[in-house]
Amino acid sequence: MGFLLALDQGTTSSRSIVFDAHGQIKAMAQQPLTQHFPAPGHIEHDPIEIWQSQQQTALAAITQAQIEPADLTAVGITNQRETTVLWSRATGQPLANAIVWQDRRTVERCLALRAQGHDELIMRKTGLLLDAYFSATKLAWLLDNVPGARQQAENGELAFGTIDTWLTWQLTEGAAHVTDPSNASRTLLFDIHRLQWDEELLALFDIPASVLPTVVPSAHVIGTSTIKTLGANVPLAARIGDQQAATVGQTCFTPGMAKNTYGTGCFLLMNTGATPAKSRHRLLTTVGWQLPEDQHQEDRKGLAYCLEGSVFMGGATVQWLRDGLELIETASDIEALAASVPDTGDVFLVPALTGLGAPIWDGEARGLLVGMTRGTTKAHIARAALQGIALQVADVLTAMQADAQTELTQLRVDGGASANNLLMQIQADLLGIEVVRPKITETTALGAAYLAGLTMGVWADHDALSEYWTVDRVFEPTWSSDQRQTMLDRWKQAIERSKGWSNP
C-alpha cells in the first residue's frame, strides 16, 4: 500500500505515473494524443481517445510498477484545462469532439460580448479576461452548432465537463459528475469569491445550469473507480487543473512563490494566499486548490489563489519547427542546433501562431519571424524560437511582480522543455533571477499525487511534502541589466508588428 496513481491528461499526450509514499516515480506510461484541425483556428480532441489512452496508460503503469490495482491507495487526476466536452448522460457518449483550450473559433463571440461592455463583470466575478481561451464560449458553441444539443441540454439530458470531469465520469461509469474549483475557475462561469456557479454568467453565455458538474474540493474523495475501468475500487481522491497541480508539485505553498511550466504552452503561477489578488496588468486570478475542509482552517478551508500568466505557444513552438518547417527531426534536436550559434543575429520569432496570451491578449496576433538577412541560418531561427519562448515568459513575470508588488528571487521550472539547458539559461538571463529545476520535473502528475496522498493521510500536511523537493540544477543569470533591457526593448518592437495580423 501507499502507492498513488496520477492520471496526467495533457494536450498532446495522456500519461499515468505511479508514485510511492516518498513521492518517487515507480512507473510511468504515456501515449500521444491525436490533434484534429478541422478548420483554421479550430483545434479538437476525440474524447473517447482521451479516455481510452488514459485508461490504457493507467493499466500499463500499474503493470510496470509490479503492483495490483488494489495496491493503490488513491487516484489523483490532473488535466489540460478549459478543453470542453459535452456528452449524453444516458449513454456517456460525447456529442462531438472536445474543443481544445487553444481553439480560437469563438473569438468573434468574445469580441461581441466585450463590445457590449461585459468585461468588468466577468473580471470581477471570475478573475479572468473575456477570451476564447476559456470554456464558456466553447460550450455555447457546441450547444448552438451540434444538432439538437441545446434542446437536449434544456431537457437535462447532457453533461458538460472539463477533462477532469470527463475522466471522473468514465472512471466511475457515470456515478460522479464533479469538478474542483481549480478547473471550475477556468470556465468564465464560476464566481471565485463565492466558490459557486454564477447565475448571471450562465445567463450571459446562455448556458443551462443542468449541464454543470458539482464543485467539490480539489483534495476530496468523491467515489471510486470501478472494477471494469481500473481493475479495483480505488478512491478518486484528487482532481486539479494541470498548472495548479504543477504549483503543488513544486511545493509553492507559501504566498509569493512561483513556478513556470514549459509544456505545450507556458504557464507561470504565483501563490497569492487565501485571498484573490486582482491583476492590474491583464493577468488572471485563479483558484489554485482547495484542501479538505478539516485541514488548515486558518487558510479559509485550505483555499489558495494564484496569479497566472498564460503563454499559448511554449513547447508547441518547437513542435512547429519540427513538424511544420521540418528544421529538426526531434524536439530535443533544437538545443544543439540553437547552441551552434552564439546569438540569434538580431532575428526574433514571435510565436503567436494561436494569438498572444498574457499580458497582451490579442487573439488576432499571428506568428512573426523578423530580422533575417542573407546570413541567417536555421540555427539562428532555432535560437530565436527558444528566445521567443523565454521572452514571453519574461513579459508575464514582469507583469506578475508588478501585480503582487513583490520581487521574485527565484523561479521554479518544470515541464518537458525545462530539460533544455540552453532555454533555461536564456530564461535566467532574461529574468535576471535564478531559474531552479528540480530533480523530478513531472511536477504536474506529482501535484495530483500529493493532493490524493494528503486526502488519504499518506502525508500529514503540505509541510511534509516540501521535504521531498530537491534541486537538479540552478541557472544563474549572466547578462548585464543593460543587455537585458536592450533585448526586451527589441522584443517589444517585434511584438507590435505581430498584433492584429488576422484582422488588419
Image (cartoon, grey):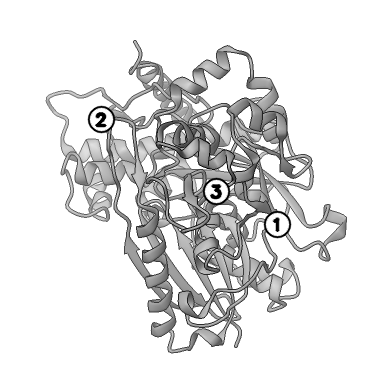
| Residue 181 picture location, percent across and down | 67, 50
Question: Residue placed at 60% from the left, 60% from the top?
Answer: 239
The answer to whether 429 appears left or right of 245 in the picture is left
Camera-side residue of 435 and 30 = 30
Locate residue 247, reporting x and y percent: 60, 55
Give the number of marks.
3
Mark 1–mark 2 distance (CA, rounded to whole Å): 52 Å
**Mark 3 and mark 2: span between their CA atoms?**
58 Å
Circle nearer the N terminus (3, 1): 3
Q: Name the residue under label 1.
A: 216
* Amino acid found under the numbered disc labelled 3: Glu
Badge nearest the viewer, 3 or 2: 3
Q: Give residue 345's mark.
A: 2
- The image shows residue 361 at horizontal and vertical percentages of 50, 26
The three-letter code of the residue at mark 2 reads Gly
**Looking at the image, is mark 3 or mark 2 earlier in the sequence?**
3
Q: Give the residue drawn at x 55%, y 51%.
A: 243
Q: Nearer the viewer, residue 55 or 27?
A: 55
Mark 3, residue position: 157
Badge 1 amino acid: Val
Q: Position of residue 295 (x, y in %)?
A: 81, 65
Q: Residues within 10 Å of mark 1 (few under 14, many from 20)?
A: many
- Mark identifier at residue 144: none
- The answer to whether marks 3 and 2 mark residues whose Cβ atoms lie closer than 8 Å is no
- In the drawing, does residue 271 fall left or right of residue 437? right
Q: How far apart are marks 3 and 1 (CA)?
A: 22 Å
